[in-house]
Structure formats: C-alpha cells, structure tokens
Image (tube, helix red, strand yellow):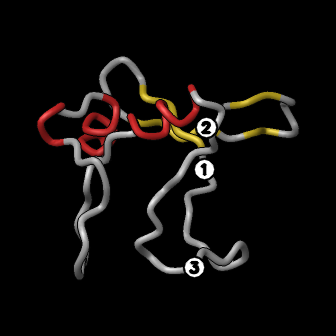
C-alpha cells in the first residue's frame, strides 16, 4: 500500500494518462492526469470523471471508509475516532 500511495502522491509525468484506456481491464491501475478538471474548474465548469466500472450504487459501492496517515518513515497508520477519549487516535 505504501507503493500505491507514493505513486499517487508523486507520479511520473510520463506515466500519467489523459484518460482511462478503452478495453477490458482486470486488476490493473492507470495513473490519470487531472489537468482536464483543473482547466474546467478555472472556467467554472464541474469536474468530469470517466466511469469505466459501470454505475456506482451508493449502498453497494466499494470504497475505503477508513482514514490513514502517512508517517515519516512512509508507513501508513490507520486513524480512528475514540469517542471515550473524544479524540482521533
């Protein structure tokens, strides 16, 4: 997971694609440039994201609900709310 976070935070400019390639994809990733949305935002237009996975259902969509913090050595630490202590740990 540290490699993925590093890739997303510091992508190689030559590796960024303007959009998701067409065709069948299984267990692959594509670092995508967000420049198109940055330009759209400057002109008051909303962001546009390719939907290559089909319709996202709010109740069934897969996403990570946990927060992580990358510490100095690069490791990821899960952050969670401790109600008894009234703070994040």
2 vs 1, front mark: 1
Q: Residue furthest top?
A: 72
Judging from the image, what secondary structure is the residue with disc 3 in? loop
Image point (27%, 28%), residue name: 10
Numbered marks: total = 3
Please, what secondary structure does the residue beneath circle 1 have?
loop
Disc 2 and disc 1 in contact, CB within 8 angstroms: yes
Identify the mark at residue 79; answer none if there is no mark.
2
Distance, label 2 to label 3, CA atoms, is 30 Å
Q: Is residue 32 above or below residue 38?
A: below
The reply, left or right, for residue 14 in relation to residue 42 is: left
Residue hosting label 3: 55
Give how far across and how far down residue 36 sits, in percent. 41, 39
The residue under the point 22% across, 42% down is: 16
Where does the C terminus fall, quadrant-wise? top right
User: Label 2: few (<14), some or many (≥20) within 10 Å?
Assistant: few
Query: Which quarter of the picture shows residue 15?
Result: top left
- Residue 44 drawn above or below residue 73: below
Which is more toward the observer, 34 or 3?
34
| Residue 57 percent across, percent down from the top left | 66, 78
- Badge 1 is on which residue? 66
């Amino acid at each position: 997971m540290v490699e993925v976070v590093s890739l997303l935070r510091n992508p190689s400019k030559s590796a960024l694609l303007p959009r998701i390639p067409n065709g069948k994809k299984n267990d692959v990733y594509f670092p995508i440039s967000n420049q198109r949305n940055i330009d759209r935002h400057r002109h008051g237009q909303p962001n546009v994201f390719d939907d290559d996975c089909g319709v996202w259902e709010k109740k069934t969509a897969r996403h990570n609900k946990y927060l992580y913090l990358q510490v100095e050595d690069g490791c990821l630490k899960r952050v969670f709310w401790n109600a008894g202590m009234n703070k994040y740990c």
